[in-house]
Amino acid sequence: MSPTMREKLAEYDFLPDDALVSAAVAAIILSISVWTLRRENPVPARQISERKRGRRVGDLRAKVRGAESEHPKPNKAA
């Protein structure tokens, strides 16, 4: 693990719930690969800019605790 990633993980505990983290940080927090994170999407991504997305810290913390996300996924009509 790179020193930069270690710093980001150390800062995670102090971030507010509305902060956004990268897919790499979210994958480490959830103990899954980045590919699994993108495929299964256990925590929805939020648009940061035109080409950049992030995962909300509050949603990650809820997922780790086993609680439902504060922003549930909408039901798709069949």
Image (tube, rainbow, N blue to C red):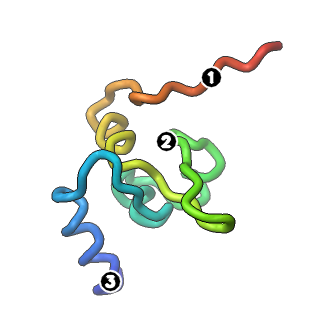
Disc 2 + disc 3, Cβ < 8 Å: no
Residue type beneath disc 3: Thr
In the picture, the quarter occupied by the N terminus is: bottom left
**Outermost residue toward the front in this view:** 49
Which residue position is annotated with label 1?
74
Which residue position is annotated with label 2?
43
Q: Position of residue 36 (x, y in %)?
A: 58, 52
Could you tell which of marks 2 and 3 lies nearer the N-terminus? 3
Identified at 50% across, 25% down, the residue is 72
In the depicted view, which residue is nearer to us: 48 or 41? Answer: 48
Up-down: is 6 above or below 66? below
In the depicted view, which residue is nearer to us: 8 or 27? Answer: 8
Q: Position of residue 34 (x, y in %)?
A: 54, 61
Q: SS of the residue at dot 2?
A: loop
Residue type beneath disc 2: Val
Which residue position is annotated with label 3?
4
